[in-house]
Amino acid sequence: MIRGLYTAAAGMLTQENRHDTAVQNLANVNTPGYKQVNSVARSFPEMLLTMLGGTSDAPVSTIGKLNTGVFAEEALSMYQQGVIKASSNPTDFALVSDMEMTDPATGQNISFDGSGKYLSANGDVIYKPEAFFTVEDQDGQTRYTKDGNFKVSTDGRLLTSTGYQVLDGNNRPIVLTGSVDSFKVDEQGYVLDPNTGARGQRIGVSVVGQPYQMVRDGEGVFRIDDPQGADVRALGINDRVEVRQNYLESSNVNASEVVVDMNTALRAYEANQKVIQFYDKSLDKAVNEVGKV
């Protein structure tokens, strides 16, 4: 009986995590560059139940297997590109990327699924590379973001909406020399001189070959603990990535899907709650009524 109580409690905790994830997605439906998070649940290992006290020939008999509950294993970010919307702000930027890769086994272009994954004929999982703006936090640590809603500080530095420094291709701060109205950037990310049109600094864009190794760090940015393992590199000439000025990438959250997921988690939570209430009543009767006999 107590085993079932723990199983139901584990289900409640998992559905609570699933509900919180859905609420987080819904709260960021209008956040530029936000990537939807999906909660992944996994069952605990099954237990093999046996019964002691059988016959002399078979003192132990097998009853069967029992699942001992479920837990929220991880939260996966979905990196599908959001809708690119026009903006009147010259410091708004969006990354439009369509990375291509070939299957080493067949030599054919890979067709990634909705989550940006591909399973090769050899059973290897290949992830679609993603492009991110390279920024620096207040502690001087490199971070990555899709949120191109930038602003300009009083000393001409290009900053994210939360105050992180936007870096160039050489990891140096981008500093505007002219007015914001004359700030022009071409499709490859180069800052253009307002008078001559000559290229200057290039907005730092990093390509992450293993985006699922990225960790959310709050404030709309990601961190990478192992850049080499995540295959982080600077934007190359042949990479199909375009920097669009006066545009923003909207959140890729599907509001209808999130609301359905949130309500499903709530109903599953209530179902597990009723199971616990049933066990509570059964234990109460066993202790306070049956125990008196």
Image (tube, rainbow, N blue to C red):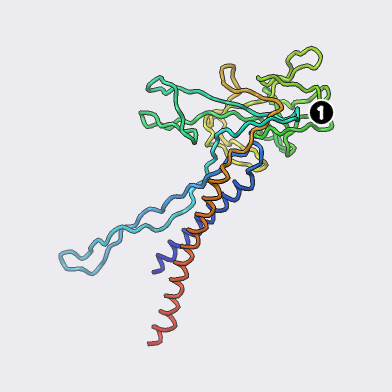
Type of residue at label 1? Gly
**The C terminus sits in image quarter:** bottom left
Residue under pointer 1: 156
Quadrant in which the N terminus is drawn? bottom left
Picture residue at 58% right of the left edge, 41% below the top: 253
Residue at screen point 59% across, 34% down: 82
Q: Farthest left residue?
A: 57
69 left or right of 129 in image: left
Picture layout, residue 195 above or below residue 123:
above
Judge left or right: residue 292 versus residue 217.
left
Q: Position of residue 207 (x, y in %)?
A: 58, 27
**Mark 1 Cα-neighbour bin, 10 Å: few <14, some 14–19, many ≥20:** some
Image side of residue 109 versus residue 157, left or right: left
Left or right: 226 in relation to 124: right
Residue 289 place in picture, x, y as percent: 42, 84
Q: Nearer the viewer, residue 60 or 210?
A: 210
- The residue at 49%/65% (across/down) is 273
The kind of secondary structure element at disc 1 is loop
Q: Quadrant of residue 90?
A: top right
In the image, residue 128 above or below residue 29: above
Tell me: residue 196, above or below residue 146: above
Image spot of residue 171 (x, y percent): 69, 26
Q: How many marks?
A: 1
Q: Relative to the observer, which residue lies in front, 211 or 270?
A: 270
Rendered location of residue 137, percent (x, y): 70, 36
| Vertical arrangement, residue 55 with respect to residue 239, above or below | below
